[in-house]
């Protein structure tokens, strides 16, 4: 599969201010939607080919909205419709379809910290040749709290990170740079390995930025699975 | 593509196996009952499609427990040794029933934060796929979450994986348990019919929630032969699309629904007039049912008989595409189209009544599922060799 474009968005106080969001997202859109939108629009702007389909990879989805919704139903017995809608794991891919006008296949893959590899792997099995892949996860205070309370557990061992990586792929084109991934495989994750939220996506962006060839292994201690991404440059 | 379905499994309010559920379906009775799994925190108690029989084992979450019950049925007697095989898991609820309980406890006892890692781990949909993969020895696992259309995509992607030689076998599982989060979520959208949903009826006002797990074992034609398992049905085509219109409301012209159904027919190389029954998404919400039939009227010169399972068993969210496909496959055996339970009066906006239940030779079925985010999925199922 050929990489046509890619863009990484890691939010900082400054670039959040500079985000050029449409009116529909500016005010009340969940933060994770904004991350996904920022990376996706930048990647799409880099190529003249409009992707026909979307695959979003996310470990935890719109966790912030999910936590707020659960908080609300336990404190006031009432949920907010907006938070409920956003809490569904595919809310980012639905939003991207609307904002970018992409009406083809629209999938969301939730493969824990292997979601980057899993989304790339899934691209082979959709009918459209061009696909916008967006990997997105968010950080929130509750996750930080959990991280500090159990420092030798699961993917919290190395802390968490948030951001979005968007890649436009043509899976019928074999020219460089090429990207592929294995299926997510059940395994016993070695105790020396941990999966860190969003780190695989950042590592992949680094390889693509530097135009290097290489492999990235990811592990999910929570799902007891692993996967491998391969990047080939000429 | 014609990928054989060699075994199925199912648990829902309709029964503890595909066959027992099919018998219930043919009675035309509702299997909805008052919600007792948790306190809905509302003035009235809704009717839901709750599983009231014992599940074979209690796992970490109810979603996981139901998935194991369905998978055990589908894999019963199948020799998986030496095969490359994968699991596609369709879920939107995941371990939320545990998460919401944990969060409630955490509010009372903040010190429970020290056990949060394991709870968080089980919140993830992928944790269920990982557990199933280990339990059954799958060589690959794939977790999809596209709201109420997920089940269809799990089957479609699984069939495509076999078609492209990635696997010899794929177990497509759809599973979602009832949870307070989903109940109050749909309630906040004013989309719950407390008295039981009435798909396609003039007076329909919303959905009944349900819970279920369905499992469909797909095999390459060669491996189906090796295992001496005739096809119960074939997955002939898969179509997928996005409305790109609204997060919760379908496009009023059903453009996305039309597109996914048209793609599935094209993929199956089948013309619309060959479809004998539309196993509709049919949720019972005013907009959804209207949009679906608008789309089907555009696709078919004369719309074939159509009906929805959701009036009988409730809307089982991500599991609905899988469980309803399992039940639709049963219709090939007896050549019977089930009635659309809950329907009484034609809606002038729809202009046509769903099936009241009829006997008809069924060779091809169109199965639709649509979800939040304007997500649409359709399958064409073809008669098998059984």
Image (cartoon, coloured by chain):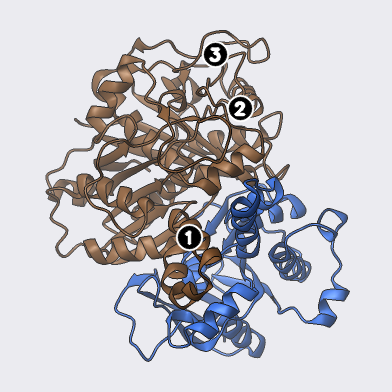
Q: How far apart are marks 2 and 3 (CA)?
A: 24 Å
* Chain B: drawing colour: brown
Q: How far apart are marks 3 and 1 (CA)?
A: 47 Å
Which of labels 3 and 1 is toward the front?
Answer: 1
Could you say where residue A48 lies in the image, as x and y percent from the top left? 76, 64
Question: Which of the marked residues, 1 or 2, is nearer the chain's N terminus?
Answer: 1
The correct choice, above or below, for B190 with respect to B70 in the image is above
* Chain A: drawing colour: blue
Which of labels 2 and 3 is toward the front?
Answer: 2
- Which image quadrant is residue A71 in? bottom right
Give the label on residue B99, or none. Answer: 1
**Helix, strand or loop at mark 3:** loop
The reply to whether dot 2 and dot 3 touch (C-beta < 8 Å) is: no
Residue plotted at (36% across, 39% down): B235
| Residue B141 visible (yes or no) | no
Residue plotted at (54% across, 13% down): B302
The correct choice, above or below, for A69 with respect to A155 in the image is above
Badge 3 is on which residue? Answer: B302
Q: In the shown orientation, is residue B163 left or right of residue B152?
A: left
Crowding at mark 2 (Cα within 10 Å: few <14, some 14-19, many 20+): many
Could you say where residue A164 lies in the image, as x and y percent from the top left? 66, 72
Q: In the shown orientation, is residue A102 left or right of residue B382?
A: right
Give the label on residue A168, or none. Answer: none
Same chain assignment for discs 1 and 2: yes
Badge 2 is on which residue? Answer: B285
| Quadrant into which the N terminus of chain B falls | top left
Which of labels 1 and 2 is toward the front?
Answer: 1
| Residue A88 visible (yes or no) | yes
Q: Distance between the residues labelled 1 and 2?
A: 28 Å
Could you say where residue B83 lies in the image, as x and y percent from the top left? 20, 62
Question: Which of the marked residues, 3 or 1, is nearer the chain's N terminus?
Answer: 1
């Amino acid at each position: 599969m050929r990489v046509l474009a890619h863009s990484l968005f890691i939010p900082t106080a400054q670039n959040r201010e500079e985000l050029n969001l449409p009116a529909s997202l500016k005010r009340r859109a969940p933060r994770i939607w904004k991350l996904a939108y920022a990376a996706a629009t930048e990647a799409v702007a880099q190529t003249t080919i409009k992707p026909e389909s979307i695959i979003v990879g996310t470990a935890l989805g719109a966790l912030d909205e999910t936590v707020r919704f659960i908080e609300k139903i336990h404190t006031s017995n009432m949920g907010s419709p907006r938070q409920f809608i956003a809490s569904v794991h595919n809310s980012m891919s639905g939003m991207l379809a609307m904002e970018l006008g992409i009406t083809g296949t629209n999938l969301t893959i939730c493969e824990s910290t292997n979601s980057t590899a899993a989304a790339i792997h899934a691209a082979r099995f959709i009918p459209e040749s061009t696909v916008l892949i967006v990997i997105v996860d968010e950080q929130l205070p509750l996750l930080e709290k959990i991280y500090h309370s159990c420092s030798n557990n699961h993917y919290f061992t190395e802390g968490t990170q948030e951001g979005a990586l968007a890649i436009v792929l043509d899976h019928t084109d074999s020219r460089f740079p090429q990207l592929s991934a294995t299926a997510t495989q059940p395994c016993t994750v070695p105790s020396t390995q941990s999966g860190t939220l969003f780190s695989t996506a950042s590592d992949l962006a680094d390889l693509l930025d530097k135009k290097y060839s290489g492999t990235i292994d990811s592990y999910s201690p929570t799902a007891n699975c692993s996967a491998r991404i391969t990047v080939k440059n000429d | 593509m014609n990928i054989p379905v060699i075994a199925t499994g199912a648990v829902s309010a309709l029964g503890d196996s595909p066959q027992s559920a099919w018998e219930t379906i043919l009675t035309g009775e509702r299997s909805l009952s008052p919600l007792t799994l948790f306190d809905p925190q509302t003035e009235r108690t809704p009717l839901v499609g709750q599983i009231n029989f014992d599940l074979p084992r209690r796992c970490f979450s109810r979603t996981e427990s139901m998935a194991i019950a369905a998978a055990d049925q589908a894999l019963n007697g199948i020799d998986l040794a030496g095969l490359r095989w994968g699991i596609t898991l369709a879920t939107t609820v995941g371990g939320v029933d545990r998460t919401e309980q944990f969060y409630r406890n955490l509010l009372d006892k903040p010190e429970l934060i020290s056990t949060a890692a394991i709870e968080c781990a089980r919140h993830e949909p992928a944790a269920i796929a990982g557990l199933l993969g280990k339990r059954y020895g799958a060589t690959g696992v794939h977790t999809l979450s596209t709201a109420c259309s997920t089940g269809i995509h799990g089957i479609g992607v699984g069939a495509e994986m076999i078609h492209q030689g990635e696997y010899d076998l794929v177990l497509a599982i759809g599973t979602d348990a009832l949870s307070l989060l989903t109940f109050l979520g749909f309630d906040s959208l004013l989309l719950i019919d407390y008295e039981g949903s009435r798909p396609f009826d003039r007076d329909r006002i919303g959905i009944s929630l349900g819970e279920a797990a369905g499992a469909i074992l797909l095999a390459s034609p060669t491996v189906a032969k090796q295992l001496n398992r005739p096809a119960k049905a074939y997955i002939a085509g898969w179509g997928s699309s996005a409305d790109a219109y609204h997060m919760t409301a379908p496009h009023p012209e059903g453009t996305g629904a039309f597109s996914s159904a048209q793609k599935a027919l094209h993929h199956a190389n089948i013309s619309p007039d060959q479809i004998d029954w539309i196993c509709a998404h049919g949720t019972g919400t005013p907009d959804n049912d209207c949009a679906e039939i608008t789309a089907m009227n555009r696709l078919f010169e004369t719309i074939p008989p159509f009906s929805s399972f959701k009036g009988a068993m409730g809307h089982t969210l991500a599991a609905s595409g899988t469980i309803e496909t399992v039940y639709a496959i049963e219709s090939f055996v007896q050549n019977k189209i089930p009635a659309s339970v809950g329907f009484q009066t034609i809606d002038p906006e729809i202009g046509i009544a769903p099936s009241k239940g009829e006997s008809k030779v069924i060779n091809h079925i169109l199965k639709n599922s649509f979800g939040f985010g304007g997500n649409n999925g359709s399958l064409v199922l073809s008669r098998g060799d059984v």
